Amino acid sequence: MDSHTLSALEFDVVRRKLADEAFTDPGRRAALALQPLPDPNAARWMQDETMEMRRAAAEEGRPPVDGLTDLAKVLVAARIEGHPLEPQELLAVAASLRAARAVLSWSSRIAWEHPKLDAIVGNVKAEAEAEKRITAAFDDAGAVADDASPELADVRKKIGKLEERIRRRLEDVIGSTKVWLQDTFMTVRNGRFVIPVKAGARTNVPGIVHDASDSGVTVYVEPAAVIEDGNDLAECRARERAEVRRILTALSDIVRVILPAVETNQRALAALDLAAARARFSERWNCVRAEIDDKCRVRLEGARHPALLFKGIDTVPIDVRLGDDFQVLVITGPNTGGKSVALKTVGLLHVMALAGLHIPAKIGARIGFFTNVCADIGDEQSIEQSLSTFSAHLKRITELLPAANSTTLVLLDELGAGTDPTEGGALGCAILEALLASGAKVIATTHLGDIKTFAATTAGVVNGSVLFDVQTLRPMYTLTIGIPGQSNAFAIARRLGLLEEVVKRAEAFVGGRERLLERAIGGLSAARDEAERDRVAMGKARADAEIAEARAKAKIQDAVEEKRSAMEAAAREAAELVGRARAEVQSALDDVRQKRVAPKEAQRRLDSAHREMAQKAHQLERPGTPLAPGEVKPGMAVHLRSLSQDGVVLAVRGGKGRATVSCGGMEIEVALEDLVRGEAPRVEAGAPAVHRSAPEAPREIDLRGLRVEEAQRRIGKEIDVCLRAGCESVRVIHGFGTGALGQAATEFLRRHPQVSHFRTGKADEGGGGVLVVTFRA
């Protein structure tokens, strides 16, 4: 993909935002250098890698790559035999090794399988011994530590003693010669301790002059009393420098040995930081993984332009499709109407997905794997090349046209603009025609009527428009496919206060055909607005229905709990009754034995207790044949005693003593003891033996014309009826259309525990618009 297209689509804006999410310089550089990948499988891998990192970061925090710095120059220097690295360079290597060790520990804490991250972390090598030796050789200030070697410790101890002795002697000299001194302090010149002596009194302070002030009034003298100690100090410092160099060389040799591991770690940790940056970018901007389609088909819902998101601009997400039922989309409407934003959104989201980034759109987004994305966007005027805007656009199109093929996405902004509208429109139509013949997928924007007409009358080409608020003169960024946009020139002119007579005169100049076209578009727009209002109303009604359904489920659950409480109370009452009856029987028997009452009176008391127990047993009785827990099976018709409702068992969790039952189109979880055997439906004599179902059971379930949610509710309810009626099979009619209903029905049937299998209908059964479902026996 050429740099011109990436620049026109503002991919740099995305890369800079991505770089802001990185924690290290190598990660930031990798983000700024990100490119679309030439292999669809590589792009899918990167998208999955981003998804794994989102989950890993949510559970274990971001990968600990802190301290990772750019070691490019350090690694070059480390290759030179015998060349000692500087302390800060060695410490940078140690920091890289420390980050590698921390990342391995972080990865080991992730309990679930993460093959994409493993592919990165698997290249990381912990060199703990090298890290330990390098770190131990330096103090907190980053200097070689005294205990880095015995020799260094010894020489620094001597240096300390010599410096202390020199200071004491200089204090004595200052005290005895201060009359000839410029000041009473000691300092260092050329590595020697000196005192400031007045130039005129130089002979009064024996010693060696090492420096003089710029004014010449002060000379810096090393008194004779410390010269010998100064010589010893110079020798010790030379030994110190030699030992430090030896230590640095030895540590550099260690780095040289592990150089391949350090280089591999650098690449892996930078890749891990980039993956973490992609994950944070995805989460921050509510992005999703996009499916990459090898057939170059595009379907985006709720797509948002990243640059508008970054600026906090509130826009309506766009829905766009391309490549299924049309190949060229022409977006029309007024200038500054949001056409270019819609165009750039599609192009930029493609580039992002192919670079391994998630995109700001709804789940289920699909982008085509285009081997080339060519864009001609914006003002291409070039003063340097003496090209007008029109010429610059035409030059760009001339370059991309010969290379266009079925795996090319072409984005053309303001096609035909910058010249005479008639000739520009004709050129635009011819260019679209040539691209259509090449098989390329094309999105073009224009406000020229001739191109609108071409799109409306050419197979494989469709019009689209972006909503524009004439009152505020601002684009609404909502893309509508199938309806051309109006230029709104006259409405905008009126809104901006142009004299009414001028606007009316302008309208008179417009030909009859053009006026009819604008009126037709206006009528379509009005119809579209009305349809949108209906859609919103239906959405609200659907939401209200879902709320009502939730409330109904809650009431059912409350009823179940209330019934259960009542049964428990009744059980307690029955237990108390049995206890009283036993006591009464025992009392009657005792009275008879002791002859306190006559046998007839005892019999009366026993009969009374029996009647009371029989009455209470009748109150607690439940209809139906009780089921043992082992008898309850999926597909069985049952009766829920607590609700007095019939249903079908969907699943049994014997270990927990509960079952999921489909009852009245809803799934309810109940206790096994609440179930009794339901009555099998009776088949009328002489009924056609098409199914084992009762006459009221459906032979087919028609989903056509329903939305996905409505279709799933209907198919669930109708299958319940089929199962209770003992049906063997049923036909599900979803039609052709966009395929959404067929996909929804397929997913529902695949999950249903009582569906044995299903297949696409044969030609005489409805073909691809029908699913034939067989239930478990």
Image (cartoon, rainbow, N blue to C red):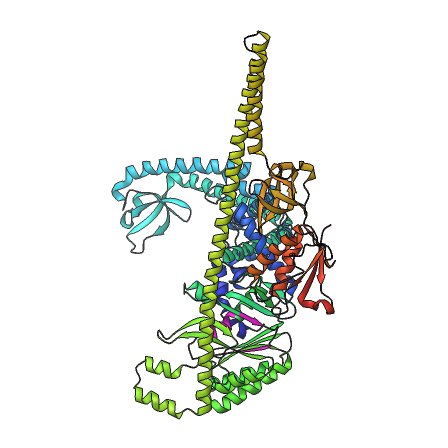
Foreground pick, 124 / 2: 2
Foreground pick, 570 / 554: 570
Residue 393 in view (yes/no): yes
> In which image quadrant can residue 639 be found?
top right
Image point (45%, 41%), residue name: 233
Q: Is residue 323 magenta?
A: yes
Image coords of residue 112 (percent x, y): 62, 46
Image coords of residue 770 (percent x, y): 68, 65
> In which image quadrant can residue 732 be found?
bottom right
The mark total stands at 0
Q: Is residue 534 magenta?
A: no
Foreground pick, 192 / 660: 660
Task: Magenta stretch: give its range.
Answer: 320-345
Image point (61%, 45%), residue name: 660
Residue 25 in view (yes/no): no
Foreground pick, 569 / 165: 569
Image coords of residue 78 (percent x, y): 59, 53
* Furthest residue toward left: 179
Image coords of residue 506 (percent x, y): 37, 90
- Using residue 679 as the reference point, say whether residue 154 is left or right of it: left
Q: Considering only vertical position in the picture, is 774 above or below 517?
A: above
Where's the N terminus, which quadrant? Answer: bottom right
